């Protein structure tokens, strides 16, 4: 009987140990599952991280930016075509400088003043998570702006048409709209090809220029509008290595453009003075009534897809079928 009791005690002890091991085993599995959950959750910020190359290097954004400031009209052009509303825009304190196609898509934004002298304090108050700046125009402000938010630094002011297209793709990726950007670029190329067919002839020397009361500033094929005309097949009469050479009347006569697209900054410009000079009538564009006035905000300020498409529409209207 005693022997039987010992065996029963041993069996009970073994059973108790087995139950304890099973319980410990379950506890270990539960801890393992709980430990793996935070590890999986920690990958989510990495998955949403955006890495893009700008004009100065690699930009890493921890997440898709929601509060974006555009320091140039061209950047705003790009953002609205992607369905992105900037919280702040450097509009030189004049909303009238936006081309109509951009302005109609802009909702509420805060003007941060001059593109040349950004208001750092005002920009900071908007709590941006991305600021898009120009490498040349905002060079001196970049260190201060970098302390406010991540920067996307692009070559915009000196950019030609092809660089603008590259900038568009960079911005699209930076704001988490890469696929939308690719689609819109394809639509742009299709529109360009369609409208090009309506131009009578591209075998012309065509010159766009900004004119103000003090001077005539040609836009060569190194500038945005001039390079776009060159991409369409037109000839650049100035053949200058700089983007915006200032020309005298004598120099303009020498380049002798066959068509002129003037972008006045004010109602009265230097052209009024030149029109009284006999040299003015020696220019082929003048003699053949091929001098056209277009909006500077369309042809020069809004360096983007909408700006390019409006340029092409103006060309078709004046030199097309």
Image (cartoon, grey):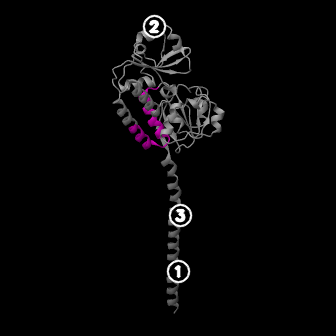
Q: Residue at x 44, y 12 (%)?
A: 252
Res 279 label: 2
Q: Are marks 1 and 3 in contact (CB under 8 Å)?
A: no
Which is more foreground, mark 2 or mark 1? 2
The answer for how far apart the CA atoms under marks 2 and 1 are is 116 Å
Sooner in the amino-acid sequence: mark 1 or mark 3? 1
Q: Which of 110 and 268 lies nearest the eye of the viewer?
A: 268
Sooner in the amino-acid sequence: mark 2 or mark 3? 3
Of the 4 image quadrants, the one containing the C terminus is: top left
What's drawn in magenta, residue-wise? 159-187
How far across and how far down the image is residue 320, in percent? 37, 26
| Depicted 234 relative to depicted 250: above or below | below
What residue is disc 1 on? Answer: 13
How far across and how far down the image is residue 45, in percent? 52, 49
Mark 3 Cα-neighbour bin, 10 Å: few <14, some 14–19, many ≥20: few
Residue 97, image quadrant: top right
| Depicted 124 relative to depicted 315: above or below | below
Res 109 label: none
The answer for how far apart the CA atoms under marks 1 and 3 are is 27 Å
Which element is circle 3 on?
Answer: helix
Res 31 label: 3
């Amino acid at each position: 009987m005693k022997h039987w009791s010992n065996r029963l005690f041993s069996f009970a002890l073994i059973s108790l140990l087995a139950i304890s091991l099973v319980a410990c085993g379950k506890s270990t599995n539960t801890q393992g599952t709980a430990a793996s959950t935070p590890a999986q959750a920690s990958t989510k910020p990495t998955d949403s991280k955006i890495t893009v190359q700008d004009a100065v290097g690699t930009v890493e954004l921890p997440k898709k930016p929601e509060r974006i400031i555009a320091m140039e009209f061209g950047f705003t052009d790009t953002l609205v075509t992607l369905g992105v509303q900037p919280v702040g825009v450097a509009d030189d304190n004049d909303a009238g400088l936006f081309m109509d196609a951009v302005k109609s898509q802009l909702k509420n934004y805060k003007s941060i003043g001059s593109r040349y002298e950004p208001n750092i304090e005002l920009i900071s108050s908007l709590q941006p998570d991305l600021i898009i700046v120009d490498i040349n125009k905002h060079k001196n402000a970049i260190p201060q702006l970098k302390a406010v938010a991540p920067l996307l630094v692009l070559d915009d002011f000196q950019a030609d048409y092809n660089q603008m297209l590259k900038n568009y793709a960079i911005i699209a990726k930076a704001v988490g709209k890469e696929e939308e950007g690719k689609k819109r670029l394809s639509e742009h190329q299709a529109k360009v090809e369609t409208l090009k067919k309506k131009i009578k002839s591209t075998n012309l020397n065509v010159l766009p220029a900004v004119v103000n009361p003090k001077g005539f500033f040609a836009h060569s094929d190194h500038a945005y509008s001039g390079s776009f005309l060159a991409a369409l097949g037109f000839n650049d009469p100035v053949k200058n290595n700089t983007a915006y050479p200032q020309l005298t009347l004598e120099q303009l006569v020498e380049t002798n453009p066959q068509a002129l697209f003037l972008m006045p900054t004010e109602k009265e410009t230097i052209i009024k003075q030149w029109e009284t000079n006999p040299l003015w009538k020696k220019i082929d564009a003048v003699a053949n009534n091929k001098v056209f006035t277009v909006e500077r905000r369309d042809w020069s300020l809004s360096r983007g897809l909408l700006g390019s498409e409006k340029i092409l529409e103006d060309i078709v209207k004046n030199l097309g079928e």
